[in-house]
Image (cartoon, helix red, strand yellow):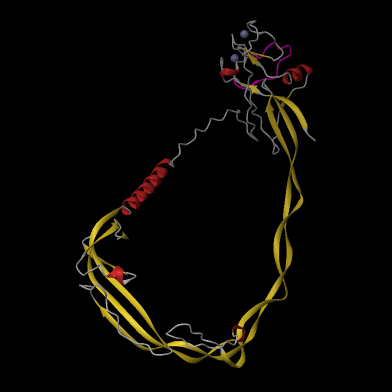
Amino acid sequence: MTEERVIWGKWNCSSCGVKGISAKPPEGEKSPRCPQCGSAREVGQNEEAYLDNARDETGKVLDAVVAETPEEVAIAKGGADWECSSCKATNRAREAACTSCGGTRSKDARELEAEPTPKKNSGATPQPQPKATPKKSSAAPIIFFLFALIVSILGYQWWGKRVNTITAKVASMKWQHVVSREAFSPTTLREWRTQLTEAAAKMPSDGRGEIAGIQNIRNCKDEHLKDERYACGVDTRCSNENVQVPDGQDCHKECKTKSNRNGSFTESCGQVCTPKYRSESRRKCEDVTKFCTRPIYAAKCDYDTYVWKPVETKKTEGSDSNNHSRLPWPDLKSGSLERITKTESYAVSIEYPFKKAIKTHLLVPKSEAEFLPYSVGQPVPIKMNNFGELTGF
Ligand SMILES: [Zn+2]
Ligand SMILES: [Zn+2]
């Protein structure tokens, strides 16, 4: 349901200064002219038509000069006026030649009066809005700063990881040889029944080939093995949630005006509706599987078996490798049902200068062969980066 009407605007004569001339064409009008000085309306000279009437709350123009006669309506709906390229006079759309100077309608005749922006309840002349000049971005200095920061961090990392070869010195050395005599001895252990399979033991010969065996499984008792999680029903969990439900619509009458670019404006008034919503609380429930835990028991039993137990331990150690081609081991002999185990450990502490201080680093040779070439006071070339981290030897 749209009500539409055509209304006439006003214009100002820039030649004689008369303001508020009605754009309503007088009867028999040839072309729009100033009633006082007779100069033709020239839109390029700030002579565009405007609406300065007051509006009601819907935007409807009050005290509007409505186009009534068939002639007026024909002009208003006839299309945009055009500007004579010779004398700049404004002519109606239906004119093929300029009514002021007789010049022919040129192809480049500008269609007149840019769309005015209709303002509700505003009597002001619709003026074209000055174009907002986009503000120059202020992000550039920040981006430059971040860039510089990243470059310096990367540069520092690059510098720090650069490796130099420097000379360290062996400060101290340590070695240890341990020999242990172990006996294959009977013992009683306890284990889960499921892990136990009866097996005969076999004694070692020359410290090898032994089988510990599992014998005499006894004293089985149920013990707590683990806790088991199992589904034990369903929990219904409910919560309230808010949902938006449609609740009719808000309607109001609204009027808009649009320039016909010939001194007239078309005003259309209609209902404008927006959907309305209301918040509704809904209860939402879901079933969630409930879990319980229960203890699981299993049998644990004693059983007889054999293990290697140390009976005697001897060690040799020293703090240098000077003049040794081999480092000595302690002398230990094994009897029947026995074996000998050997463990060796080596350490070389080196010192190197870093930032006017002396730093130390511990090398751990894996074998005697790796350890023997070192001696206290000996120079050792090492690779170190600018952060003081050792990267190679
Ligand atoms: Zn005038
Ligand atoms: Zn002309």
In which quadrant of the rendered image does the C terminus lie? bottom left
> Would residue 59 be visible to someone looking at this image?
yes
Magenta stretch in the rendered image: 18-33
Which is more toward the observer, 344 or 134? Answer: 344
User: Mainly helix, strand or loop, the magenta region?
Assistant: loop
Query: Along the line of sight, which residue is nearer the eye, 215 or 165?
Result: 215
At x 49% / y 92%, what residue is drawn?
187
Looking at the image, which residue is at 69% across and 35% down?
Answer: 59
In this view, the residue farthest toward the right is 1
Residue 170 in the image: above or below residue 71? below
Does residue 61 appear in this view?
Answer: no
Residue found farthest to the front: 205
Residue 29 is one of the magenta-drawn residues: yes
Specify whether 242 is left or right of 47: right
In the rendered image, the quadrant that contains the N terminus is top right
Determine the quadrant in which ligand 1 lies. top right
Q: Is residue 222 magenta?
A: no
Q: Nearer the viewer, residue 278 or 4?
A: 278
Q: Which x, y percent locates residue 387?
A: 30, 58
* Residue beneath the point at 33% across and 75% down: 345
